[in-house]
Amino acid sequence: MMNERLAAMQKKVKKHLDAQRYQHTMGVMYTAGALAMRYEIELEKALTAGLLHDCAKCISSKQKIKLCRKNDIPVSEVEAANPGLLHAKLGAYIAEKKYHIKEPEILCAIRCHTTGRPAMSTLDKIIYIADYIEPGRPPLPNMPVVRKLAFQDLDACMRRLLEDSLVYLESKNMPIDPITERTYQYYRNLDED
Ligand code: DGI
Ligand code: FE
Ligand code: FE
């Protein structure tokens, strides 16, 4: 681990996740680190955001809703029906309150890591992408292409991942979050210039 602050956070994260989720978290953290080197953003910010992105993932659905209500975090209709989505927002809240993260860029990357958002920052995109391509992910059909693309062109990689995600969600008959849809429209339109 590169410094004591990160090492302490890592220990705490481990306590709040199951073994599989912790393994995934380590994969995302180091993959985000590699992408930060490639795209020349601050390494520690990428490692921290990767480490904390799923810190709320292992909270039960009921508890997620309860925590949002208690802390004035708005819950949309789609989120109420799919409380799993809330781990991103709630994760940003916990990162701030329990891990004392002050950098708004890190909190933003955690908050938007599941749905994305239009015009994401480089750090936002790195976390979104690292979440999909980390070595522990079960191999998706397009994985080799997407992994290579991640190190070539972040926007093209976003478009590709969003496209694949929407197809996946539709195939499972899962309601699309309006933010996921808007994010996809944004990255699809970027290519048309
Ligand atoms: O937390 P992870 O599993 O590492 O990854 P994630 O934060 O991208 O969450 C993935 C889950 O989120 C997956 O089960 C699909 C779901 N998801 C992502 N976008 C949407 C969505 N679910 C719905 N209903 N609508 C969405 O737009
Ligand atoms: Fe997640
Ligand atoms: Fe994740």
Image: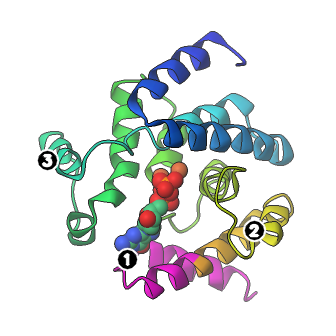
Q: Nearer the viewer, residue 157 or 59?
A: 59
Q: Secondary structure at mark 1?
A: helix
Where is ligand 1, by quadrant?
Answer: bottom left
Residue 191: percent from the left, percent from the top?
Answer: 73, 83
Q: CA distance from mark 3 to mark 1?
A: 21 Å
Residue mark closest to the camera, 1 vs 2 = 2
Pointer 1 and pointer 2: residues touching (CB < 8 Å)?
Answer: no
The residue where tag 2 is placed is: 143
Within 8 Å: ligand 1 and the Cβ of disc 2?
no
Q: Earlier in the sequence, mark 1 or mark 2?
A: 2
Residue 92, above or below 78: above
The residue where tag 1 is placed is: 178
> Which quarter of the rendered picture does the N terminus lie within?
top right
Residue 74: percent from the left, percent from the top?
Answer: 21, 55
Q: Is residue 101 visible?
A: no
Q: Nearer the viewer, residue 49 or 134?
A: 134
